[in-house]
Image (tube, rainbow, N blue to C red):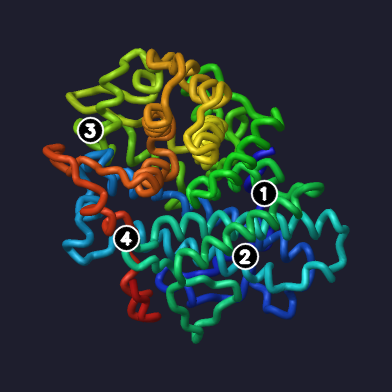
Amino acid sequence: MKRIFYSLFLLVSLISCEKFLDESPPIGLSSDKLTDIASMNALINGTYANLRSFTAYTSMITSTIVHDVNIRRDPNWIPFTRWSETGLPPVFTTNLYGDGFAALNKINTVANANVPEMIATQTEKNSVLGDMHFLRALVYFDMNNYFTLNSSGNSVPLVLDVLGVNDRVSVAKSSEIRTQIEEDIELARLYFENSAGVSNYEIATALAARIYFFHEKYDLAYQRANEVVESSKYSLESEVTAPFVTGNGSPEVIFSILFNAAEGWPGAARVNFESYQDDKERGIASLNPSSLLAQLRNADPNDKRHSDLYTEAGGLVYANGKFPSNQTDYIYLRYSEILLTRAEANIMRNNGAINVQDIEDVNAVKNRAGATDTITGSPDSSFMLEAIYQERSKELAFEHGDRFLNIRRLQKGIYNEDGTEEIPFSEYVNQLVFPFPLFEVELHDLQR
């Protein structure tokens, strides 16, 4: 079920942190030796390993952009919310960009190999191809969401081949990348149907639900989310803290990136613990008291997500509960998200009509938390959709960019850094984008 990382028995470093095209041969082998299923599995496992650093900064970057947190220290983070004014791309988005393309180069090595003709069982081949398509969908989904400029629709380069140091690329339209993402996730589901790999059919279906939801294809989002729920393979924990303490072993966790003591820096576990820890001198971020999250927290102190996942100390509020140590699994997808996605997608595909299942899905998440604002009666669509938006904000706060993605999807305003006024989406939208690394702009002449 949520099996992520196995031993990387042939893997060596592929990509330098300077330019993603400065590449040594994959796993230390020349291309003519990448002809067997063992090499393909090494590349797949290596790509899963890349996810530890690829996902490391997402929570903090997105939380900072939408002003859910205040930065108390660390000069690397302080200019981030004002990067468009300073013209200095933060190191964290530079790392994410490089790690993403390092992963894609491994994935594309598998994609361009002749896996169907390799000596292996059909199950082994399907497992490799399922993981390859799953990983490419995941990496491009995140890259496309975070690097697309709304005004032009330009995103990152769409790379489906293995690149050499002399190759040059240009940006693609977000719509082109979305098409590729959707094709990849459906192929992953197809290959995984009878042959689980490192990931499996249910994980790919859950990721598909997220993909279609944020691509605003609500009918497909509902179908995929409903399939995950109907599988009965996942359930909500009784305590809100349990998934974050248990990690990969939790029945609520659909997909996680396992902590590896040998992973070094950066790693998702270490980065997020350091960022959110409840220590004024060592932690980097505390809750912005003017943010929507703070307002929702103040409105319902009985909600265990507010009492058990936050810590108050010295006049500050720390969002440390989801990252309880520097050795925890990084949770990418939880069952509670699928319930909320199914509810909203169903309302949207039914033109605002609300049924009992939609209310039950939302209330299941609320009731687990002991929230006092459970939904009763026959709410209208505007009330219900706003309730779900607030519920996603509470439930999925600081989890892999959900707040950032929802604000952009629903064109919500945010409070400014001082909390003195709300900035409308129209004035803020072009800051909802990660900057390209300067060396990539210079090398490839990437244009927003």
The answer for how far apart the CA atoms under marks 4 and 1 are is 29 Å
Precedes in sequence: disc 2 or disc 3 = 2
Residue at image position (62%, 69%) is 108
Locate residue 255 relative to residue 386 in the image: left or right: right
Residue indicated by mark 4: 91
Residue at image position (22%, 43%) is 71
Residue at image position (24%, 53%) is 426
Q: Is residue 328 visible?
A: no
Location of residue 203 in the rendering, given as x and y in whole percent from the top left corner: 65, 43
Which element is circle 1 on?
Answer: loop
Q: 358 or 189, which lies in front?
A: 358
Locate residue 419 relative to residue 153 in the image: left or right: left
Mark 3 Cα-neighbour bin, 10 Å: few <14, some 14–19, many ≥20: some
* Amino acid, disc 4: Val
The answer for how far apart the CA atoms under marks 3 and 4 are is 23 Å
Residue indicated by mark 2: 107
Precedes in sequence: disc 2 or disc 1 = 1
Q: 55 or 360, which lies in front?
A: 360
* Amino acid, disc 3: Lys
- Looking at the image, is mark 3 or mark 4 nearer the viewer? 4
- Looking at the image, is mark 4 or mark 1 nearer the viewer? 4
Judge whether 288 appears above or below 298 on screen: below
Residue indicated by mark 1: 6
